[in-house]
Amino acid sequence: MAGPEDNFDPTVPPSGTGCVECLASGGWWFHLRRCAKCGHVGCCDSSPSQHASHHAADAHHPIIRSFEPDEPWFWNYATERYAYGPELTPPEHHPLEQPVPGPAGRVPADWEDHLN
């Protein structure tokens, strides 16, 4: 039986500086989340596409860490509660010069109307 430690791999770096799927499809995000198991960076549930929670469900990787500056918290999608986890391989957040929402040039002027 898998234990809680199976939901983490602190040696894996983040997959990039933005949501993998949004970058590939021309989309945009509000905030970013990093999978604690495989490093996948996806957009949060307030974002139009909610790629982080879809990754958690599809990959059976329930725990994410915020990929925003000054947000060192973990979330467990399976329990819908905050979680605790180990220090992950840097970087801990997207580049500070990256706008929120992002990425630059893709966010519509009425972005707030598109949040979930």
Image (cartoon, rainbow, N blue to C red):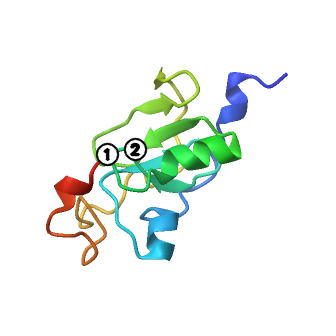
Residue at left offset 45%, top offset 72%: 23
* Dot 1 alpha-carbon crowd within 10 angstroms: few under 14, some 14 to 19, many 20 or more: few
Residue 107, picture quadrant: bottom left
Q: Residue 37: in sight, yes or no?
A: no
Q: Amino acid at mark 2?
A: Asp
Residue 65: image x %, image y %?
A: 46, 40
- 99 to the left or right of 87: left
Mark yes or no: residue 63 visible: yes
Give the quarter of the figure containing the N terminus.
top right
**Quadrant of residue 49 in the image?**
bottom left
> Which residue appears at 19% of the width and 54% of the height?
113
Question: Which of the numbered marks, if any, corresponds to residue 45?
Answer: 2
- Position of residue 39 relative to residue 61, above or below, is below
Which residue position is annotated with label 1? 116
Circle 2/circle 1 CB separation < 8 Å: yes
Residue at coordinates 58% horizontally, 52% vertically from top-left? 39
Callout 1 amino acid: Asn
Which residue is located at x 45 percent, y 67 percent? 22
Mark 1: which secondary structure?
A: loop
Q: Is residue 3 above or below residue 43?
A: above
The crowd level at tag 2 (other Cα within 10 Å; few <14, some 14-19, many 20+) is some
Q: Is 43 situated left or right of 12 in this image?
A: left
Q: Dot 2: what SS? A: loop
